[in-house]
Amino acid sequence: MDAHHALRERIARIERQRPVDAPALVALGAGDVDRALGGGLARARLHEIFAAERDETAGAAGFAAMLACLMLPAGAPVLWLRQEEAERQGGRLHAPGLAEIGLDPARLVLAVLPDAVTLLRAAADVVRCAEVGAVVIELWRQPQALDLTASRRLAVAAEASGVTALMLRAQAEPGPSAAQTRWSVRAAPSIALEAQAPGNTMLDVELLRQRGRPSGGRWRLEWDREAARFGQAAAGGTAASGAVAAAAERGSADGAAAFRLAG
């Protein structure tokens, strides 16, 4: 049985019900960003996340995991679909890092698929499954299979099912797509806590595009791991602890989670 059929069987076993009355917009918790988005990030839409630089894959993956955490209805699972090349070149995902941001690793279903064509086919099936809370679709570089038609197919499926689709692009440049929003992300030094303890994860995010609203805007966001939401760092913050989002861990035993923090 190939990975695609195995994943479809796994989805069929998911029986948790997504709340019908989930809000259309989810506030990220950072006032300026939420205002730029018209109140928050839209559920049931396709959103794109790019690493700002070639070595910023972990920061972009962390942002995707944080958004998934925010967008998940109670009890719903998140599926993370990875292209095999991303697993090989970028390193495995790290379960303790997922728990660190407040997302229970038990709610994650990870599938590593051999190529972009297989991944996009599986993603179309997953996004149509209304019982799934959020889907991270991680592609490597610029696959020919990811064209405007393929992204539109995912966007239409997300809108119909109510599932939020987060397309994570590693080692890639933005191109035409049907995504509701497009983000560029890099890790940033965190603000030191008392006694120079490592601070919360900090990310530098830029809103490159959004459909139907003005684009543009760049913010430094701090992830509050206790509240599992973002806050906006004060301009010109204080001393940094040096804790940043690190690369995904190579050789992780289970490989079924998000990113980790480097002290």
Image: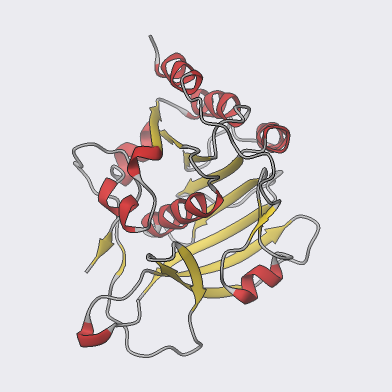
User: Residue 119 at x, y = what percent?
Assistant: 50, 28
User: Residue 180 at x, y = what percent?
Assistant: 70, 50
Specify the farthest residue to the top.
Answer: 1
Image quarter in which the N terminus is found? top left
Kindly indicate the quadrant of the structure image that contains residue 112: top left
Q: As displayed, is residue 71 above or below residue 108?
A: below
Q: Is residue 21 left or right of residue 4?
A: right
Q: Residue at x 20, y 42 (%)?
A: 252
User: Residue 163 at x, y = what percent?
Assistant: 62, 38
Kindly indicate the quadrant of the structure image that contains residue 149: top right
User: Residue 257 at x, y = what percent?
Assistant: 33, 43
Q: As displayed, is residue 84 above or below residue 263?
A: above
Image quarter in which the C terminus is found? bottom left
Q: Looking at this view, is 162 or 111 the one in front? A: 162
Specify the farthest residue to the right.
Answer: 212
How many numbered markers are drawn?
0
Q: As displayed, is residue 197 above or below residue 6?
A: below
Q: As displayed, is residue 219 above or below residue 247?
A: below
Q: Looking at this view, is 123 or 208 the one in front? A: 123
Q: Is residue 249 left or right of residue 38?
A: left
Q: Is residue 58 left or right of residue 221?
A: left
Q: Is residue 247 left or right of residue 172?
A: left
